[in-house]
């Protein structure tokens, strides 16, 4: 085999090729240098900007909403971490092969997912699912579907559920207050979101933090005056009473007479703020603060204050109620039966319309109105609850006799449950008026002596007789404690007058009567069958106050009573 001849390369050709390669390497190095170091034609900034635009993100750090607690620190509203899944529709359109997996993970049909992508096709953001548990959201993100991202949020949770629903209200899906105290204190509870810059990969996962940015500032906490133990007890007894009587609705308010703090405030019907899928507008109303009703005979003690202040009457002053009715103008006002001659205290005990009418017609009507006004009727309690009603306290230049009479026993005016409780706290607080509070107080509020301590004591003594044998509220009694209170039964107002078969049954009282610490008002709306306040509302008062006195460690003031007091079936029409 012949040897293959070697090909000789000309030295100048070799030098040209080598020089070309060296020049190419130099140009590449120079280009890299100008782009990444020298930035001669701003190429470095361009590439850096493009890279950052694809990988650097500003991540919002959600702020933790403040906690709402009861007076003892028990949580009533807390925010728990959740995750929301969102997508960039423009990116998601390029991953149609993954739509079936994604729809299954989101528990929706492929057709629904398709419609959503088409609807938001021109935007770069749409929510796929809000408020998923973090574990479920993380499992979905592990599918690594292009255009699908995770956003961390908080969701409000209410441990007591429907027991505190009307008071607290709720937040919307973005954790902003919509009802109740969540709405009132929304700015206080809301925190300020933070921000941080992060580096993300193609699937939206955070690789590292670029800088700490601005930390989130959590919302401030709110401590209510409510005692959750009493709230549960009041709710339980009210719900039982509504079921037992077939009533349309009801409310209970309990106040600490010393501080004016609301210890419990409950309504029926209620709702579950943690699951509002079947929520009706009617169930949302905080009836104790918003619904107005004519208080009926529960304001007779205020009329007696005007009588005692006039100097014309004392608790033992006699009033002739024969023959058991009285005609005022064309209206006939009747007692449950003819009580004959009664003292002023017995007029209250029997809830005599005739006796109250005679007292009212002997007084200046503006004096009675003035007492009602001093007790806070016709004015907001300034509790801070959104939509609170002020009630109506009508004042006229000229009163007809029938208006003077009916006004004195609670018709022609309207109040809320909370207003009535605030008014009765004047009796419990030795004639001192103070505004109620739904927040826990750390110091005494402003106080005003609106009636003398002597008259306040006299009225409490008369109200105690109402709960004793022969009174209209024997069912309000509590073993080992002296109770003072007043029943009320009012016809419901309708267009053109009053309904003959629809009533509000009411009981308002204080305990213990010797040195009152608790004020409670119970209202039952449209009970079926028995409808008198002494038969329907007073038993609820008895059970709620009995538990409250013991939970608050208030000493008994009637230990001499070894046998239960006799309870009278029936009662006056008040």
Image (tube, rainbow, N blue to C red):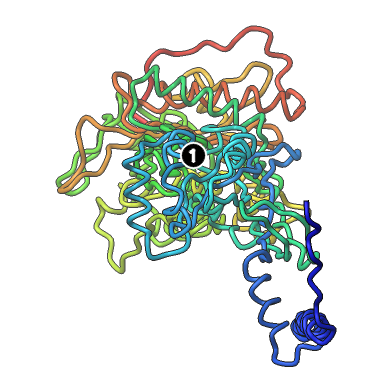
Count of marks, rendered view: 1
> In the orientation shown, which residue stands out farthest toward the front?
2
Image coordinates of residue 273 in percent, x first then y, are 50, 38
Residue 566: % across, % down: 52, 10
Q: Nearer the viewer, residue 570 or 221?
A: 221
List x then y, in percent, for residue 208. Answer: 78, 57
Left or right, 331 with respect to 441, comes to left
Q: From the viewer's perspective, is residue 350 above or below residue 115? A: above
Residue positioned most to the bottom: 40
Quarter of the rendering containing residue 563: top right
* Observer-nearest of 437 and 56: 56
Q: Is residue 258 left or right of residue 184?
A: right
Q: Residue at x 40, y 28 (%)?
A: 533
- Depth order, front residue of 235/148: 148
Q: Is residue 70 left or right of residue 499?
A: right
Q: Quadrant location of the C terminus? A: top left
Residue neighbourhood size for the residue with mark 1, other residues' Cα within 10 Å, grouped as few (<14), some (14–19), many (≥20): few
| For residue 59, above or below residue 480 | below
- Residue labelled with disc 1: 317
Q: Give the percent coordinates (x, y) of residue 261.
A: 66, 46
* Res. 172 in view: yes
Kindly identify the residue that appears in the image at 33 percent across and 20 percent down.
530
Q: Is residue 444 above or below residue 283?
A: below
Residue 347 in view? no
Q: Secondary structure at mark 1?
A: loop
């Amino acid at each position: 085999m012949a040897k293959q001849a070697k090909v000789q390369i000309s030295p100048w050709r070799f030098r040209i090729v080598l020089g070309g390669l060296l020049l190419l390497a130099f140009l590449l190095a120079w280009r890299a240098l100008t782009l990444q170091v020298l930035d001669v034609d701003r190429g470095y900034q361009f590439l850096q900007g493009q890279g950052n635009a694809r990988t650097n993100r500003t991540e919002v750090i959600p702020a933790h909403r403040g906690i709402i607690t009861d007076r003892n620190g028990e949580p009533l509203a807390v925010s728990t971490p959740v995750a929301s899944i969102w997508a960039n529709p423009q990116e998601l359109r390029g991953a149609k092969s993954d739509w079936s997996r994604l729809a299954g993970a989101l528990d929706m049909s492929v057709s629904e997912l398709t419609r959503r992508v088409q609807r938001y096709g021109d935007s770069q953001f749409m929510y796929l699912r809000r408020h998923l548990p973090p574990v479920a959201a993380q499992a979905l993100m592990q599918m690594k579907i292009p255009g699908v991202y995770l956003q961390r949020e908080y969701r409000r949770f209410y441990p007591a559920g429907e027991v505190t629903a009307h008071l607290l209200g709720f937040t919307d899906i973005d954790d902003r207050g919509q009802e109740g105290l969540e709405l009132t204190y929304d700015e206080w509870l809301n925190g300020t979101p933070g921000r941080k810059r992060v580096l993300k990969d193609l699937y939206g996962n955070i690789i590292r933090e670029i800088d700490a940015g601005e930390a989130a500032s959590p919302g401030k906490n709110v401590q209510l005056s409510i005692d959750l133990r009493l709230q549960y007890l009041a709710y339980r007894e009210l719900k039982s009473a509504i079921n037992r009587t077939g009533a349309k609705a009801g409310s209970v308010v309990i106040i600490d007479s010393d501080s004016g703090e609301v210890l419990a405030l409950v309504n029926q019907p209620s709702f579950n703020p943690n699951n509002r899928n079947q929520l009706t507008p009617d169930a949302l109303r905080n009836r104790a603060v918003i619904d107005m009703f004519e208080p009926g005979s529960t304001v007779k003690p205020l009329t007696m204050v005007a009588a005692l202040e006039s100097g014309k009457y004392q608790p033992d002053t006699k009033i002739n109620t024969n023959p058991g009715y009285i005609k005022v103008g064309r209206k006939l006002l009747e007692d449950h039966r003819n009580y004959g001659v009664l003292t002023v205290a017995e007029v209250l005990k029997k809830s005599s319309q005739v006796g109250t009418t005679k007292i009212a017609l002997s007084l200046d009507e503006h004096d009675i109105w003035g007492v009602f006004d001093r007790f806070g009727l016709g004015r907001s309690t300034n509790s801070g609850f959104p939509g609170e009603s002020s009630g109506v306290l009508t004042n006229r230049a000229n009163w007809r006799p029938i208006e003077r009479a009916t006004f004195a026993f609670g018709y022609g005016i309207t109040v809320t449950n909370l207003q009535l409780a605030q008014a009765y706290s004047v009796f419990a607080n030795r004639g001192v008026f103070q505004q109620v509070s739904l927040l826990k107080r750390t110091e005494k509020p402003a106080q005003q002596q609106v009636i003398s301590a002597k008259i306040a004591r006299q009225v409490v003594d008369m109200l105690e007789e109402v709960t004793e044998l022969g009174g209209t509220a024997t069912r309000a009694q509590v073993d080992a404690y002296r109770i003072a209170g007043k029943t009320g039964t009012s016809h419901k107002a309708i267009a053109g007058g009053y309904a003959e078969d629809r009533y509000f049954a009411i009981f308002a009282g204080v305990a213990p009567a010797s040195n009152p610490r608790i004020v409670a008002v119970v209202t039952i709306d449209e009970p079926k069958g028995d409808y008198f306040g002494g038969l329907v509302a007073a038993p609820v008062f008895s059970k709620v106050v009995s538990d409250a006195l013991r939970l608050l460690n208030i000493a008994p003031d009637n230990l001499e009573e070894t046998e239960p007091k006799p309870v009278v079936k029936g009662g006056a029409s008040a």
